[in-house]
């Protein structure tokens, strides 16, 4: 068996809004729930970040560099760690200092700016690089867009910024008959390598691990290893362009938060690397290493991804409907991005510190979670949308957001902005 395995983890926490009332518009400019944000960071840190960071550090040390992982950590998460939990930030720094944990680039505020504002997108990517370099390590030239959102248009922007590759969802409607085990190129940016998530095996860990109704429960490291062994037999890609690439991409909160410690998720992860490394031909690689392999393999250029419409790793549809699927979400997006020119003008008029604070607030209000909370899909993905959701309903999320937007717009000199 020969296969390259890439573990990638997303770390993100938004600046959640407090229950900002209509009567506060024009009187109170404090929008964010500091107490809740601090409590959630501490809770997730104790259940996930600290124990999982410790486990990964032990595995990296035990296997002397043969075990490697990759992260994306948003600027908003880093900001909250710095403010509320510096011990968590230090534990991530220790991981990156091993040289076996790779940090990817992304937008600083987990925004959808790649779809709405090329200028804001560029600035947030640069800001993330600055924040990450200051607190953790220099990100590698591999891009991970918010929620793995990608399209021909986004790929062209990413390539123009000089990135070598981007992580993407191995969505069936994008790949069609093709396998996510190939390394592809983007049709709109042939120089950009597309590293695909294997969503079936990734979601076995991230979503199905503790589901006792699942026919494969319980998932053990031995069973997972056997599934991986089947990959080369079922997908003989080695004869058509190199060693298979297995992208196991998931939220870092999978470990200890989404899947509690009592489910055995930490024991599973502790055992898995040793099981896999004992098999001949299995190796762990980072996205940067995978990209270098792809760039040196000319056969990979023959396999192109064409994505006229954006796709993502969210929900069963793997499109943008988690954020742009209904009228209240669309109105919120219009409200935040129509302010861009006014925000930038106002920032230039204010003293630097005040201008920087105004711009930071605008960016915190762009974070995709605000719109995710407004999603009205309550079927297959309902429980996912409720997780860490501070609102009782999507409509409450919209009302509070639009109240905030009414006040924020007035601060930018736009009095006609409507509140909810």
Image (cartoon, grey):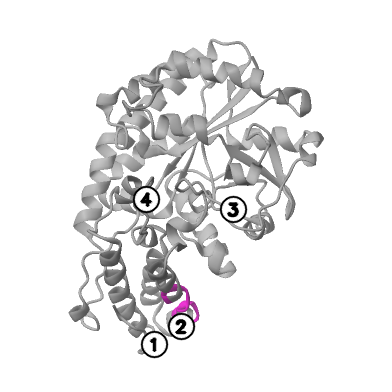
Alpha carbons under labels 4 and 3: distance apart: 22 Å
Disc 1: CA contacts within 10 A as few (<14), some (14-19) or many (>=20): some
Nearer the viewer's eye, disc 1 or disc 3? Answer: 3
Determine which residue is flagged by label 1: 414
Question: Which residue range is magenta in the image?
Answer: 335-343
> In the rendered image, is residue 10 in sight?
yes
Q: Position of residue 296 (x, y in %)?
A: 77, 34
Dominant SS of magenta comes to helix
Distance of label 2 from label 4 (alpha carbons): 27 Å
Residue 109 at least partly seen:
no
Left or right of 171 on screen, residue 418: left
Left or right: residue 5 compared with residue 57 = right
Q: CB of mark 4 within 8 Å of CB of mark 3?
A: no
Percent coordinates x, y for residue 158 in the rendering: 63, 55
Residue at the image position 47 percent from the left and 14 percent from the top: 274
Where disc 4 sits, the SS reads helix
Residue drawn at x 36%, y 21% as measured from the top left: 217
Q: Which of marks 4 and 1 is nearer the N terminus?
A: 4
Q: Please rate how many residues cluster around mark 4, counting C-alpha atoms within 10 Å: few if below 14, some from 14 to 19, many from 20.
A: many
Rendered location of residue 255, percent (x, y): 35, 32
As rendered, which of 398 and 352 lies closer to the eye? 398
Pick whichever of labels 2 and 4 is earlier in the sequence.
Answer: 4
Q: Residue 50 carries which label?
A: none
Task: Report which residue position mark 4 lands on.
Answer: 77
- 262 horizontally vs 291: left or right: left
> Residue at coordinates 70% horizontally, 40% vertically from top-left?
184
- Residue that numbered label 3 is attached to: 150
């Amino acid at each position: 068996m020969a296969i390259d395995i890439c573990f990638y983890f997303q770390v993100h926490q938004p600046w959640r809004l407090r229950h900002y009332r209509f009567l506060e518009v024009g009187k109170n400019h404090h929008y964010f729930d500091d107490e809740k944000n601090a409590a959630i960071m501490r809770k997730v840190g104790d259940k996930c970040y600290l124990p999982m960071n410790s486990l990964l550090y032990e595995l990296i040390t035990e296997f002397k560099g043969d075990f490697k992982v990759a992260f994306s950590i948003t600027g908003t998460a880093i900001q909250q760690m710095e403010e509320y939990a510096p011990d968590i930030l230090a534990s991530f720094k220790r991981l990156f200092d091993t040289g076996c944990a790779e940090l990817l680039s992304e937008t600083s505020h987990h925004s959808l700016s790649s779809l709405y504002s090329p200028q804001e997108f560029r600035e947030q990517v640069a800001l993330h690089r600055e924040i990450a370099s200051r607190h953790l390590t220099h990100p590698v030239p591999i891009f991970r867009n918010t929620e793995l959102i990608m399209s021909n248009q986004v790929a062209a922007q990413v390539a123009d910024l000089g990135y070598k590759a981007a992580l993407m969802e191995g969505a069936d409607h994008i790949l069609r008959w093709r396998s996510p085990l190939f390394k592809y190129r983007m049709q709109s940016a042939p120089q950009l390598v597309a590293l695909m998530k294997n969503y079936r095996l990734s979601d076995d860990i991230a979503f199905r691990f503790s589901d006792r109704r699942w026919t494969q429960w319980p998932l053990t490291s031995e069973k997972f290893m056997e599934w991986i062994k089947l990959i080369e037999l079922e997908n003989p890609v080695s004869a058509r362009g190199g060693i298979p690439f297995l992208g196991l991409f998931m939220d870092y909160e999978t470990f200890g938060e989404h899947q509690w410690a009592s489910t055995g998720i930490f024991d599973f992860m502790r055992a898995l690397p040793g099981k896999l490394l004992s098999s001949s031909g299995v190796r762990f690689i980072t996205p940067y290493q995978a990209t270098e392999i792809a760039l040196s393999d000319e056969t990979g250029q023959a396999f192109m991804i064409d994505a006229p419409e954006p796709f993502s790793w969210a929900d069963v549809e793997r499109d943008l409907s988690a954020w742009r699927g209904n009228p209240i979400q669309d109105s919120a997006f219009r409200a935040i991005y129509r302010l861009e020119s006014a925000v930038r003008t106002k920032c230039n008029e204010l003293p630097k510190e005040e201008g920087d604070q105004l711009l930071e607030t605008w960016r915190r209000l762009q974070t995709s979670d605000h719109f995710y909370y407004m999603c009205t899909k309550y079927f297959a993905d309902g429980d996912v949308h409720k997780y860490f959701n501070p609102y009782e309903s999507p409509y409450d999320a919209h009302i509070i957001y639009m109240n905030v937007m009414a006040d924020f717009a007035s601060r930018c000199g736009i009095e006609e902005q409507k509140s909810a």
